[in-house]
Image (cartoon, grey):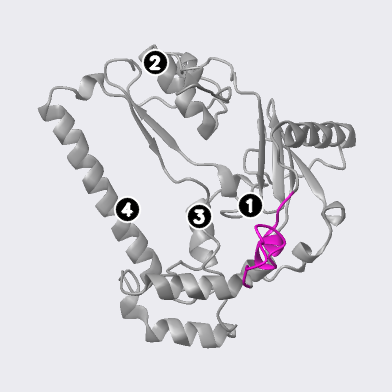
């Protein structure tokens, strides 16, 4: 529970500091004309604390049994939330509680628990429906197009003579004062370290690829094509409880093909997993050290900072 106490304390501190900013804008008489986005997280709650939580042990450290790790954490309970708890992460149980009602966690691109977060949009001058709720599908890449749209400016095509890439995403301005407007962001892919999913018009196909060093799940040792895709209709089952893959194989095949199209279009190849990172199958030069040795070097270099 101490892990979550510290987490709650940090949220309280963050809330206080956001309040200071809001109060300052009030004092400047600029609050009504200020557009504020508050994203509650950048992904799902973290699974990196594993089953027992982590105070200051890198995942490259010597493995301990669950009993040994609990004993170790209890011995350092007073350090949780201090500068010495450099690897501080709450246990998986708290991660699941934080993600409820969705399943799985951060770095699970296949699950809503790994990707779905609340978004608060505050703009007194432009939002008429105070405290209203919107359910249109959206993604973090929609924030910039929304901001540009509401402010009324266009992104530059070139910066210092360098041609800029086309901005991805869909402006959410259409939904601000129309709660019933149909979603305009209708297609989105997700990928991280092997896990992946594709969303289109309420349907979602997903492939789990757990990291064995975090969860101990042997599934991560299998090849990609040995894993099982799942299919969900988020319009009727937004918590992903009813797998429809066997009932609608044609829809699943359609979405899998669509994911591959998106992967090629957005340069996802080659697919990179945690095993690739740890075993230095990427970003390797002739002078590269094993991954865990580099982690130790970085840790030593930052001690005392």
Residue indicated by mark 4: 11
- Is residue 194 left or right of 297 when viewed as pictured? right
Cα gap from disc 1 to disc 3, whole angstroms: 10 Å
Residue indicated by mark 3: 45
Pinpoint residue 268: horizontal percent, then vertical percent.
71, 41
- Residue at 36 percent of width and 74 percent of height: 303
Judging from the image, what secondary structure is the residue with disc 1 in?
loop
Q: Marks 4 and 2: in contact by CB < 8 Å?
A: no
Looking at the rendering, the stretch of residues picked out in magenta corresponds to: 271-289
Cα gap from disc 2 to disc 4, whole angstroms: 29 Å
Pair 2/3: label in front:
2
Front in this rendered view, residue 230 or 82: 82
Taking the view exactly as shown, the residue that stands out farthest to the top is 152
Label 2: few (<14), some or many (≥20) within 10 Å?
Answer: some
| Vertical placement of residue 71 versus 38, above or below | below
Q: Marks 3 and 2: in contact by CB < 8 Å?
A: no
Q: Earlier in the sequence, mark 2 or mark 1?
A: 1
Residue 108, label in figure: 1
């Amino acid at each position: 529970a101490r892990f979550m106490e510290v987490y709650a304390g940090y949220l309280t501190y963050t809330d206080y500091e956001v309040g200071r900013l809001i109060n300052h804008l009030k004092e400047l008489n600029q609050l009504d004309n200020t557009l504020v986005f508050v994203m509650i997280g950048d992904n799902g709650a973290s699974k990196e604390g594993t089953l027992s939580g982590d105070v200051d042990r890198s995942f490259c450290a010597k493995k301990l049994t669950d009993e040994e790790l609990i004993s170790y954490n209890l011995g350092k309970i007073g350090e949780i939330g201090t500068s010495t708890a450099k690897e501080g992460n709450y246990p998986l149980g708290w991660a699941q509680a934080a993600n409820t009602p969705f399943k799985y966690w951060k770095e699970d691109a296949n699950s809503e628990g790994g990707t779905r977060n609340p978004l608060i949009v505050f703009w007194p001058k432009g939002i008429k429906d105070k405290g209203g709720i919107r359910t249109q599908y959206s993604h973090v890449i929609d924030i910039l197009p929304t901001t540009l749209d509401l402010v009324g400016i266009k992104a530059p095509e070139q910066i210092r003579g360098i041609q800029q890439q086309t901005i991805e995403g869909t402006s959410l301005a259409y939904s601000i004062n129309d709660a019933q407007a149909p979603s305009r962001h209708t297609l989105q892919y997700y990928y991280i370290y092997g896990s992946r999913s594709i969303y289109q018009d309420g349907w979602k196909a997903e492939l789990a690829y757990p990291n064995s060093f975090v969860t101990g799940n042997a599934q991560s040792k299998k090849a990609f094509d040995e894993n099982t895709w799942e299919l969900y209709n988020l319009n009727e089952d937004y918590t992903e409880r009813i797998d429809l893959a066997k009932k609608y194989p044609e829809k699943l095949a359609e979405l899998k093909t669509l994911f591959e199209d998106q992967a090629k279009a957005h340069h996802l190849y080659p697919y990179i997993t945690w095993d690739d990172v740890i075993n230095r199958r990427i970003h390797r030069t002739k002078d590269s050290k094993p991954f865990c040795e580099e982690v130790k070097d970085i840790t030593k270099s930052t001690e005392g900072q």
